[in-house]
Image (tube, coloured by chain):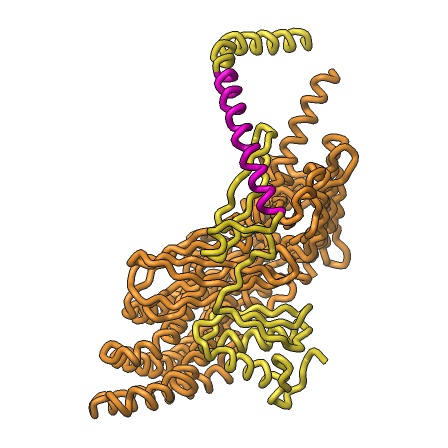
Amino acid sequence: MKTIIIKLFCCCCLFAFTNNAEAQFWKEKAAQIKASAKQKANQKLDNKVDNALDKGVETTDSVVTGKKKILTKKKNKKGGEKMEEDNGAATTSEVEEKPDNEIVIKTNIKCGTGKMLVLAALQDTDGVASVSIDTDSGKVYITTSAKEAYDAASDVIRSNGFTADGKKPTSSKNNPCN
Amino acid sequence: MQFYKSIFFYLLSSLLLQYSFCQGKKEGLPITVKINTGVNISNGAVEIAGKSASMNNDPGMVYIEIKTPDGSIDKLSARADKQTYEYLVKYTPEGLGKYDVTAYASDKVQKAETDFTVSASIAIEESFTEFEQAKAKAVKAIEENVISISTSVAPPEEIANAKQKVAKVKEAIVDFDKNWGNIKSGLKGLQELAKKYPDVNFLAAPYMGKMANQLKQGSDILKQVESDLGSSKASGGDECNRLYQVSESCAAFSTGMNFLSGGILAISESIFIDKVWPKIEETVAKKSFTANDNFAFKQAGKTALTGRAGLKNLATKSFGAGFIGDLTQYVSDELFKKYCTEYKGPVKGDYTVEFKNEGKTYLRYKLTYEGKISLYARKDKLKSASIPALRGYLEGNVTNMDFTDNVWAVEDQSEWTEIKNQRIPAPALPFSTSDNDPGFGAVARGVLPGSFYFPLEAKMVQGKMVVKLMPPRSDFTPAYVNSTVVVVKAKQKPYNTSGAVFSYPISNAQFILSRTMRMPDKSPTVTLDIKTSNGTSTLQQSFTRTETPDNNTKVDFNMNLKMSNE
């Protein structure tokens, strides 16, 4: 039984192979020519890019747009490598764009209870579009739709018993993180 | 023979892998997006939310682009929480029409898309009507079911008692309607002024939008009450099952009304006391209002404040469990306990999956779940029938998730240095929600992450209980996954860093429970022994099973189940 199954499998493979063999030959030939041309072009590009990046030079576009263009090596499906230009798509933490409308306030919010308290209060503050509180660093990240939001946010944090950018709390509320 | 055996194990392994583990690697940091607000009006706040992670130790930045109906692009940003990975950003649309939203994670590799439509402020009035209709229908459904079931199981004097309990609920609803009517009148007055004065519209729209959303969400809960009781009535025959559903629906009704009343009070405070009203008075009313408009403005405010005070008073003394609590207690204690026998008890178990590649473990997760099982039938039928039939449910939730993985057991690390590896286990509530429900009801519990609910059908045959697991009413969703965010930098070019997310699907509760109890696929049934002592019948069983379809896969199932009629 086992031998019959193996033989049947071999027959199927042979049939499929002979049918595709000719087409495969021409495909491979074309691919070889393409690959050879691409390799030459890539080598030139690789050298140029390496030289530029080693010198710490950014492309002209990056100076104009404020975005760094990074050339990343990505493996293609065939296992080869190709250079891809990543148009403004930041791939490092260093190039993360800091939006103009983000304000960061250093506080002493270091616990979950304090975080929930201030988060709820800030989300209800006029001009605040989004809030995130990092209890590891005590930083409050706020994106705003109004310039005066910094003062409003700072007041909210201080009125809940926390410091904001070194300014003391304005409320006698006990800091739940102490 | 060895050949067939290996084919069998290959198939079994494939099946298990398909159910339990299908690692999905996606280049780039994860990103999702959804719109939280169900009603979006011009100048109102639209809430855009989702999840993402970061490349470094700061909260992950999320970039959002919104294509407005006129084709222009608005850009927003937000930071995702470091613990929950969730972000929320408010956006104020101006024009009417469809808005396309695209969210990018901080590396801008992956994106997620959604859209929302901004309607004219008339949508608020539609939400008033929708809420009022949903409330009326839910009350009617509760009334009809309580009267119908009590007629079916109880003597005539009991039916009068049932009608009295229902009448009390309806009285509370009348009080609510009176006060809500006054608030609504104030809101409509404000809306009329907003149509005439753009500055009023600008100040009021965000809060009017909030109110519309609160009403929409509450209406959805009340609509569920009506739809659940409708199906309960249609199923007919089994009064105990219907009584259980009515008591759950009463809990859901309370949840809906609490949610609504709390929201209406908070938002009306912002509108009529704290924020909108004083600003209109200060800026627009003094400068631009005509004498008639000034009068209308003051009248609207007074009416709304009267309604708000009345609603606050009602909420303090009658809402919460008290609002419909008498009826809930009557249904679950007086009717259910009097006429039905219930076998109930706790269910606790765990499920562990471990996958290896060339001897290295690359994925292991253990989920622990807790819940309850209940089977019930009418007392008279349980005694008289030769093979009594029971109905019930098996409900629970994941209470703990241990998850470890090693992506480098299957990925080539030769060119990369790992700079961040952040595991994101599927969320688990650390307690059994069915045992610690503060009155939410099964509907609200069913939407919690990692929860499951299976209706059961059972028959008592010769001292044994044959229990059949019916198709789930809720189960783990496809979004319930463990995942890991990995950030790497190229060894050759250290400035070149990139992130990827590895997602590991979790077997659903149907698979876990049916396999644990060794239920056949075609008819998922289990037979439990009934032990009776001093008039109390107890069904107790432990299930333990280990499957090793091949050398690299190991799955452990454990469960303890106990129920009794004491």
Taking the magenta stretch, the answer to whether it contains residue B233 is no
On screen, residue A145 above or below B374: below
Residue B342, relative to residue B320: is it above or below? above
Q: Left or right: where does residue A79 sit relative to residue B238?
A: right
Q: Is residue A125 visible?
A: yes
Quadrant hosting residue B79? bottom right
Chief secondary structure of the magenta span? helix
Q: Which chain is yellow?
A: A
| Residue at image coords 53%, 72% | A103
- In depth, the one of B69 and B47 nearer the eye is B69
Q: In the image, is residue A48 part of the stretch drawn in magenta?
A: yes
Give the magenta range.
Answer: A27-54
Quarter of the picture containing the N terminus of chain B is top right
Q: Nearer the viewer, residue B560 or B56?
A: B56
Question: In the figure, B398 relative to B20: above or below?
Answer: below
Q: Residue B250, how many percent across, how many down?
A: 49, 67
Determine whether, in the image, residue B251 is placed left or right of residue B434: left
Q: Residue furthest right?
A: B359
Q: Is any part of residue B133 visible from this angle?
A: no
State the quadrant of the C terminus of chain B: bottom right
Comparing B303 with B154, the one in front is B303
Task: Give the percent coordinates (x, y) of residue B558.
Answer: 74, 46
Q: Position of residue B542 (x, y in %)?
A: 76, 47
Residue under the image location 51 percent in, 69 percent down: A102
Chain ID for orange:
B
Residue B211 lies, in percent from the top left, at 39, 73
Taking depth in this image into account, of B44 and A137 the one nearest to the observer is A137
Q: Quadrant of residue B24?
A: top right
